[in-house]
Amino acid sequence: MTTLQKRTSIPLALPTSLPSKSERLQSLAIRQDRWTKYSVPDVDVDAVCRAVTLHKAFQLQEGYVIPDLPKFSDLTPCGDLKEEDDDELCELEAHRLVQIANSEAAIRFEGSESMLGPADANGYFRLHWLGQRLIQALQICKHDALVVMVEHIDRNLHGYASIQERLLAYFDPATGDERFSGPLLLQGEEYQRYYHAMVNYLTAVLVKIVLQSFRGTYWINNIIAVIARISAKMKVVGHDLPAATEQTLQNGSDARSRIQKREAKNAAYYANNPGLGFNRNYKAAPPPPNRAGYATKYFSEMDLLHNAVIHMLIDSLSAFAVSNHLAPGVDEFESSIALYESFITSEQILLCEQRDGGIGAASETGVTRAFTAGFEVCLRTWEALEKKPTSHTNFSWTSLKWRCSYVDDEGELRPKSRKGAVKLGSMTRVITATVLYAMSSGTFSASLHNLIDKILFSSGKDNRFALLLVEQPKMICTAILRTSQYESRRPTERENSDACPVSETFLLQKRAVGHNEHGSSSDTYAETLSWAVKSPNKTVTLSDREQAKRNLEAVKNK
């Protein structure tokens, strides 16, 4: 896992002198206007469907509409689809996502218990194989979006060239085949059914986390519309990924040809043209080829939302498609997350360990806020999953344990915590639990925070485009995901206490755990979900958050 992105904190760029009381009150009022309490969403499906076809009539200002703009996530080049088919497929996805958005029910994965088999090595290999295909489909979506941007907005080909190289690393256009892909673990109707189920679940979870994070009619309608378009395109290109890759590369080639022809005509008007009387030895750089006219806002917003959605989906899928060759076996891993208080400052600290052993941390308020929103969505589904009957073998399972305590405005723990544990015996239940887990941790939270930041700083003061942040409860929490293969090979006692996974650190054992509660129902799986390695020479106190707080306060008061 790459390190969570750490950006320069906004307060560092502010004046160090204290503003006047009136200025502070005015600033406070503006900040309060940016917040809203969580409520059951009421997304207008007709408005989202109009946003799906925004390219047909983009309203720049009231009464000022720009028609016939280039389409992002266009489906018509993929197969024999017509414009009407494109609209119909995207609107079907929009209806599905709006129905999920407006429901308070926990998200469910559409699939039978036997889908992808039991939670063993073969099941995880199939999930890894499926995750790779989903990432490749998203890269095709990203390449097509960049082709539109390169042709109309800028000449920065770095991102375009990078994604093209990534596509060529996996596919050979000369033969139309995937390079060194190994056996096809899923084929035919079985592959299509599993692939579509994964796309549906991924996009549903993303919509839920977005609505838990922020509101604003304009942005919510547009981001759900973009997710609907990307979802529809993933399903279309997933039918034949080699053919779709060849098509998107051809789209890029055609765009480059159009750009070259256009620039050849425009070259006569550049400042270094000899006919304009300039020094022939003067080599002026050609101007940026912005051909967006008055529709720059359309291109900028579509680029922002498409990139954000694709990056967030790829960030979450990286937990399934393991590409790190130094990682342990496909079914031998542990992953953990912890959110705890600094106590030294008002910040919270997010610590994540991915299944390949990579560790990332972040303390920026926006990242921890995005994580909290995702974890709230996780809790609803995990608690619903815990209530369902489960079956698993004694040899192959994946376990998940979580604990969440809420903190009031005075920094004191609230009386009750939310905690639970499940054993996942089938890959269907593994997917149900771990897609949410992946979307609430790792680089996903940083990507969501970056999207919110960019919207806040680009929406201006026009109330039509206002974005409201949903108030998040302050919490400390932990979650551990572990497979039976990993559990069976864990040492009973470590020789060096410093060499341990995140789940066995002091921070997760004490600082991120709220109440000391014994004999709870969660202890059913204590043998396989212990917070730390059992040692006859060491007693671990799980709920020592208050002691850690008092110790730090004593140090500060000296």
Image (tube, rainbow, N blue to C red):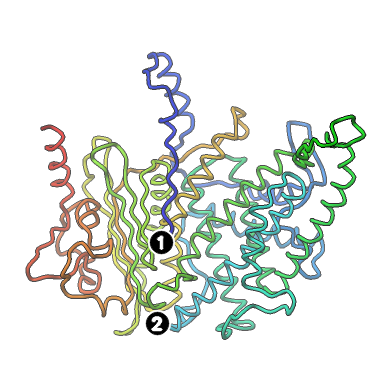
Quarter location, residue 366: top left
Residue visible at 46% across and 64% down?
435
- Whether residue 537 is visible to the viewer of this picture, yes or no, is yes
Question: Residue under circle 2?
Answer: 120
| Separation of marks 1 and 2 at Cα, in angstroms | 19 Å
Which mark is drawn over residue 263?
A: none
Mark 2 crowd level (few <14, some 14–19, many ≥20, 10 Å Cα): many
**Residue 20: percent from the left, percent from the top?**
39, 13
Q: Image check: 63 left or right of 372? A: right
Q: Image check: 241 left or right of 116? A: right
Image vertical order of residue 235 relative to residue 91, above or below: below
Residue type marked 1: Tyr
Query: In the displayed image of the protein, which residue is found farthest to the front?
Result: 281
**Residue 477: percent from the left, percent from the top?**
29, 53
Residue visible at 39% across and 16% down?
19
**Residue 84: percent from the left, percent from the top?**
80, 60
First of labels 1, 2 by sequence position? 2
Image vertical order of residue 193 relative to residue 63, above or below: below
Question: Residue under circle 1?
Answer: 437
Q: Image check: 492 left or right of 296? A: left
Mark 1 crowd level (few <14, some 14–19, many ≥20, 10 Å Cα): many
Along the line of sight, the residue nearer the viewer: 261 or 421: 261
Residue type marked 2: Asp
- Whether residue 240 is visible to the viewer of this picture, yes or no, is no
Image vertical order of residue 488 relative to residue 402, above or below: below
